[in-house]
Image (tube, grey):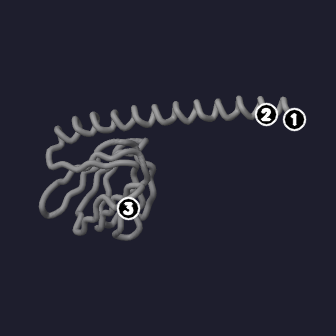
Amino acid sequence: MQLKVVLPHQIFLEETGVQRIVIETRLGAFGILPRRLDCAAPLAAGILVYETKQGEQYLAVGAGLLTKVGRNVSVAVSRAMRSDDLKSLRQQAQLEFSKEDEKQKDVRAAVARLEHAFMRHFLELKHYV
């Protein structure tokens, strides 16, 4: 199979000769073999494992979408990290992803404050008309 992992602004990974893939969805983990029927699945943040002739490889991925068409498997996710060591990958991913989540919370709070200020000024302008 051919595996492609795509982030919002770049292609993170393109791998050929993939023999199997195990991925976590919102309904649980499932495996993909070359002859599996075509499918699409929403992905939960977690670990993606794929196997090539060189052995198992591990990716920590954010939430996203998986599609399989023929021998092509595409994974579009919000973020991804790669490592040969599963234990260290889990620890590193939890640390990095939690930092990003905090940044996203800060951005959402700032946008909410801007929206609130805009609406307040808009309502003040309405009183002048």
Q: Is residue 70 left or right of residue 89?
A: right
Q: Which residue is mark 3?
A: 74
Q: Is residue 121 left or right of residue 42?
A: right
Q: CA distance from mark 2 to mark 3?
A: 50 Å
Camera-near label (2 vs 3) is 2
Q: CA distance from mark 1 to mark 2?
A: 7 Å
Q: Is residue 49 placed above or below 99 in the rendered structure?
A: below
Mark 1 = which residue? 129
The amino acid beneath tag 1 is: Val
User: Crowdedness of circle 2 by 10 Å Cα count: few (<14), some, many (20+)?
Assistant: few
Question: Residue placed at 19% from the left, 53% from the top?
Answer: 57
Q: Quick one: which residue is furthest to the left in this view?
A: 54
Taking the spot 23% from the left edge, 63% from the top edge, the residue there is 19
In the image, residue 43 sits, relative to residue 12, either above or below, namely: above
The C terminus - image quarter: top right
Work out which residue is located at the far front of the displayed protein and give it: 128
